[in-house]
Every structure is written in C-alpha cells, then in structure tokens.
Amino acid sequence: MLVRTKASPRPVDGHLAALAGEQIFCSEFKYRKGTVVFGEGEEAEYVYQIISGAVRTYKLLPDGRRQINSFHLPGDLFGLENGATHRFTAEAVVETNVRITGRRSLLDTMAHRELGAKELLSLVTRNLKHAENHMLLLGRKTALERVAAFLLEMDERLDHPDVMTLPMKRRDIADYLGLTLETVSRTFSAFRDEKLLQFCGVSQRQLVLLNRIRLAQLDT
Amino acid sequence: MLVRTKASPRPVDGHLAALAGEQIFCSEFKYRKGTVVFGEGEEAEYVYQIISGAVRTYKLLPDGRRQINSFHLPGDLFGLENGATHRFTAEAVVETNVRITGRRSLLDTMAHRELGAKELLSLVTRNLKHAENHMLLLGRKTALERVAAFLLEMDERLDHPDVMTLPMKRRDIADYLGLTLETVSRTFSAFRDEKLLQFCGVSQRQLVLLNRIRLAQLDT
DNA sequence: CGTCGCGTTGACAAGGTTCAAATTTGGTGG
DNA sequence: CCACCAAATTTGAACCTTGTCAACGCGACG
C-alpha cells in the first residue's frame, strides 16, 4: 500500500526544496499525456516531484511485456537513483506538472545536513515498502484481491474522494497488477454488479466506492 | 537480479563495522535452521549481516500464503528499517551465523559521516533495485522464465560454482517465485530433461548448470 | 523397520489469458 | 453542434498454463 501524501504533516512530504532547506534551485516543467519523463538506462540527472497529474514508472521485457512498478500522484517524489542511470522508465499518464531539481545539488546539499540524510533515507525506504507490498500482491494474490487492493490504494492516495477519477487506463492498471486488461475490466464489472462500486458520468474512469469495508475484506 | 557480494571491491560490501569506520560494537550470533531472526511488526532494534548460511525474508497473508522477498547470502545486510518496526519476517534457511549491531548506533554513527550516509543509501537502493526486478518477474514472467531467472541469480550470487548447492527447499523457491512447489519441481525436471542442468549426488539441492547461455535466453 | 520430511510425477480442475467482436467514448474537422 | 473515426472498454467463448489433489519414491533417523 502506498503512503498518502496529501496534507501530510511529515516533513518529507513537503516541497522538494524544503528537503534541503530551501537551498536548491527548482524549476517546473509540464509533460503532455503519454510523454516520457526519463527512460530506463538514461543518465539520472534530476529528481522529480509531481505538482499535478500522474506518472507511471515501469520496466519492459524485450517482447513488450510491461510491469508498472508504481503510479506517482501529486506530492510524490520519484527519479532519485543511487547509481548514475535510471533503472526504469517514467511516463506521464495524463498532462503532468513537475518540479525538478538536479540530483547532484540535492545530494550535495543533503550531505551537509544530518536531518536531510534521514529524510532522504525515509524517502527511499517508502518506495521499498511499497515494492515489498506489491511483490506480495503480484506473487500471491488473486485477480479479485489485486483489483480490490488497487481500488483501495487509489482511494487512500486520493484521500477518499466521493468520486474517484482514475488518471490511468485499463491497460495501465493491468500492467500494474500483473493481469490483462480484459481481466481488470471483467473484475470492475463484477464489482459493479455486486454493488461494491458504481461508474459515474459517461467515462469509465470515474467511479464511486460503495462498500470500502467489503473491498478490504476481498483484499484479504 | 541480485548483486554479488563476495570479494566485491565496493566499500558497502565489507564488514558491517567498516560502514561506520570500525566504531560500532558488533556481536555475532548463530541461528539454527528454521528459526526466526525477527518477525513482521517486531521492533527493529538491530541490523544484521550474514557471515555464513542463508536467510529468507517474507510476508504472509492471513490465510497462510507466503511471498518471499529475497534470500540473503553471506555478505548481505538485512533488517535495516527506517521506521520503528520490521515490515517482514526473517528466518534462517539453514544454520546461519550473523553479525549484529544496534540500529541506533549504526544510524547515529552515520549521521556524523557524509560518506556513511551515501553508503547507507546505496544499501537500501540495492534492495529496492532487487525488488523492482522481482516485481517484473512476478508480474510478467512465465514459470519457465522465473525458474531460469532464479537459477541464474543463485549462480551469480554464489560466484558461478561448478556445483551449486541450494540452501533452500522447493517450497521456499516456489514462494519466492510466486509459483507452487509442484511447478518448480516440474520445471527443474524439464530443464534436466533438456540437459540445461543436472542433479548432483543424492540430494536434489545440488546441481550443475550445463548451459547458462540457454538459461539466460529462456529468462528473456 | 516404520515413520517423517522432502521431492517427483500424474490426472484433473480452474483461474486467467487469448482471440474475436460488439459497444462506448473522446477527439477532430466540417 | 454534429458527424465521423480511432481509441478505449466491455463482453463472450475457447484455450492453456498453472494450481490442486493424490500417490509414490527415496533417504534419514529413531
């Protein structure tokens, strides 16, 4: 499960520059829907924080199979690497605004502040925690459980909105959950038929969770 | 894919105490086969480095389904948490000797040395990298590809021995790869029939890789 | 010698994928 | 604003990989 980021009191959730005591230069940038922020293997020069929109980070197999590691929503940081290159690709799911700062300037600034080092570590650890939970999902959960978990994760990260607007399409969800888009669609339909959720408006990307408790039970 | 640790020149691979400049007190401890090093949810007081043996770290679902995040072999560090508690359970796969140091003493010492912070970060990042690769395996690879990847991972981490001795049983491998033990066993047999490997001695835990190249192709 | 843990193998079931087609949605240009 | 087309989503049916259940083999050990 991912950690909520909106309106969180923890320091690491704040403005990127705040991490290093407002000493870093941050520029802003806009990515159009579907464009690549950085590619796997590219040099890791910058660190990113999402202002608005959504980003998917993923790995590809040679034959095109794709595994999405995570979706990044407003407030989330991503792209920080320890080595020189990115280990995965990042793409904008929808039009996305990000704050950018040089990796070097961030790390250098960190090195002079004990507090910063701790926060930086906690940042990476958060990604690790998500990865561990996701391995459990991918390795051991059924399609039903995966989709229920996904809905609850998004619900939490979007702060339990009345109407949840998913930025990503079925294919993205499938590649995140280790399923096919057909299975995801069918499971959504099954949940709708069981009155666990309902679609809102004309788009299938807007939905209302009608029974979070039951969904949580389904997740196991 | 995990990073080899034996005889590596990188500073982070060395003795645990070296990380903080030999200033920490390290004690040693032995765990018998199958015993718990620490449990999920327990307070994270210590950091561990394996001297000999092997440790599995895993998460459980309420109904008993298990996902092994990783196997730790000699030289590997594990158990470092950012929060106060462990996010998973660690158990000795075989009789295992570990070096132990207090988490606090490690982190405190780190805080005074810029170098240490960087190495610590790289340590966590290494786990993250493994997790990312494992998500790709769990989410998108076939049973054949998973087992091939497992064999190659173990081969590399054990430094390409002529005869590979697996410390873990089939059930552990299955829970690591998101398969059942029967599927693992069948795939091993299939590889043996195709002369990609052969079993050694009476135990099925000792084997020889006969065609690493072909295995790498199977992994995709 | 019997039991127990571990591994292998077979037969069958099932969850999920694949392939195909229908339906809906969103964007674009007239 | 509406028509039209491409993309996204849903739905159906057949198929297949993997899981499930069960039997068996083998060595270790009391």
Image (tube, coloured by chain):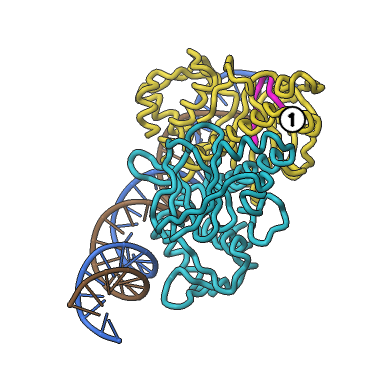
Chain colours: A cyan, B yellow, C brown, D blue
Q: Residues within 10 Å of mark 1 (few under 14, many from 20)?
A: many
Q: How many marks?
A: 1
Which residue does the image show at 58% across and 32% down from the upper left? B126
Which residue does the image show at 69% across and 58% down from the upper left? A8
As drawn, B64 above or below A5:
above
> Is the magenta region chiefly helix, strand or loop?
strand
Position in image of residue C25 (x %, y %): 37, 73
Position in image of residue B23 (x %, y %): 79, 21
**Which chain does the residue under circle 1 lie in?**
B
In this rendered view, identify the residue nearer to me: B115 or A175. B115
Q: Which residue is mark 1?
A: B110
As drawn, A16 above or below A167:
above
Residue A62 seen in the figure? yes
Residue B55 sits inside the magenta stretch: yes
Position in image of residue B69 (x %, y %): 59, 38
Q: Quadrant of residue A125?
A: top right
**What is the magenta range?**
B48-57
Which residue does the image show at 43% across and 39% down from the upper left? A40
Q: Disc 1 on helix, strand or loop?
A: helix
Which residue does the image show at 63% across and 53% down from the upper left? A15
Which quadrant of the rendered structure holds the C terminus of chain A? bottom right
Amino acid type of the residue that numbered disc 1 sits on in the rendered structure: Met
Position in image of residue A185 (x %, y %): 42, 64
Q: Quadrant of residue C13?
A: bottom left
In this rendered view, identify the residue nearer to me: B140 or A34. A34
As drawn, B10 above or below B93:
above
Residue A206 sits inside the magenta stretch: no
As drawn, B96 above or below B134:
above
Residue B74 seen in the figure? no
In this rendered view, identify the residue nearer to me: A148 or A158. A158
